[in-house]
Amino acid sequence: MTISQLSRKNVQALTPYQSARRLGGNGDVWLNANEYPVSPDFNLSERIFNRYPEPQPEAVVKGYAAYAGVQPENVIVTRGGDESIELLIKAFCESDDSVLYCPPTYGMYAVSAETLGIAAKIVPLSAEFQLDLPEIEKNLTGVKVVFVCSPNNPTGNVLNPADLQRLLEMTTNKAIVVVDEAYIEFCPASSIVKQLKNYPHLAVIRTLSKAFALAGLRCGFTLANPELIAVLQKVIAPYPLPTPVSDIAAQALQPQGLAQMRQRVNSVLTDRAWLIAQLNAIEIVEKVFESESNYALVKFQDGEKVFKALWEKGIILRDQHKALGLQNCIRITIGTQAELEKTIEAIKAV
Ligand SMILES: *Cc1c(COP(=O)(O)O)cnc(C)c1O
């Protein structure tokens, strides 16, 4: 037996998540991972590294709870939002249960389920990228965790609040509903967090990777009622957050950090409007989808051609050609004004 043959069958069959970094590229303009284009500046204040860190660093939990408008007992801090996805499946799915998700959407729901050997039911979004509730309802048997994403990556739209409420109603006492709000800072009024008090089976995923400009930190959160949080506490690693991570996360959640985050959001919204207007005036652009996030999904006449031409010029975008229903689509992160200008010029030159 080779080492790979010794690994679990589902691991043998696994295609790892095609992260932006893994896909490579030789660029000087990186608009493929929905990062903020400029790093914030922090100094480490913690100097004690010989001790294990706090399992759930109090300053981060309290800071995030205050920011999100919930109580500290509604918060668990994780190693990025991605760890939250895995913890939820680990904690709630027996080997013969399934998860359900609605493509085109974030790829990690599929990858985490496959890694853990949990089957997935796939109910595509409608043509308007909204939930297909009748199909979801028909497919709920055996489903323990439903993943939805709002604003949805890569389409950029928010899900209808009434649909989310219907989804929560139809899953009561059956399954956990996970609403992934990685991009909610770009449209804070659309958050479902206010519904936590009504639904013990609702879990909301958040992250510092997007509007907080801290993707390198690997810090995320799940917000839920205390009973659900306690279940996740059972399966999380003993010391998930390195001391320097919680040190910086706590600073980012101070009033000054929050004010900077909101400034960043405002500049992204301004730049997004500029980018979309420019794109709409280009002949080879077929459609720019409405976005509530820090990226825009664009359909071209020939998406592959545009993607490759910009790749050659060191402008790295995210190809969505293979995503369900997104032929010829490319996702463009809102970078700096200079990066966006370069991108527009390069697209015009195709
Ligand atoms: C970026 C992202 C996450 C989480 O990212 P982390 O860097 O692991 O916090 C979760 N969901 C979606 C939809 C994302 O785009």
Image (cartoon, rainbow, N blue to C red):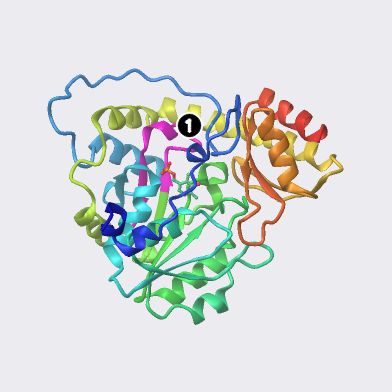
In the image: residue 158, left or right of residue 146:
right
209 drawn magenta: yes
Number of marks: 1
Left or right: 248 in relation to 124 = left
Picture layout, residue 244 above or below residue 323: above
Q: Is residue 267 visible?
A: yes
Point 70% across, 56% down: residue: 327
Q: Which residue is mark 1?
A: 213
Residue 83 image offset from top left, x and y in percent:
34, 49
Badge 1 crowding class, 10 Å Cα cut-off, few under 14, some 14 to 19, many 20 or more, is many
Magenta run includes residue 230: no
| Quadrant location of the C terminus in the rendered image | top right
What amino acid type should be assigned to the residue bearing mark 1? Ala
Give the quarter of the image for residue 173.
bottom left
98 vs 295: above or below: below
Residue 114 picture location, percent across and down: 39, 61
In the image, the segment drawn in magenta is 206-224
Quick check: is the Cβ at mark 1 less than 8 Å away from ligand 1?
Answer: no
**Residue at 41% of width from left, 55% of height from top?**
204
**Secondary structure category for the residue under label 1:** loop
In the picture, measured across the screen, residue 344 lies left or right of residue 35, that is right
Considering depth in this image, is 152 or 201 the residue closer to the camera? 152
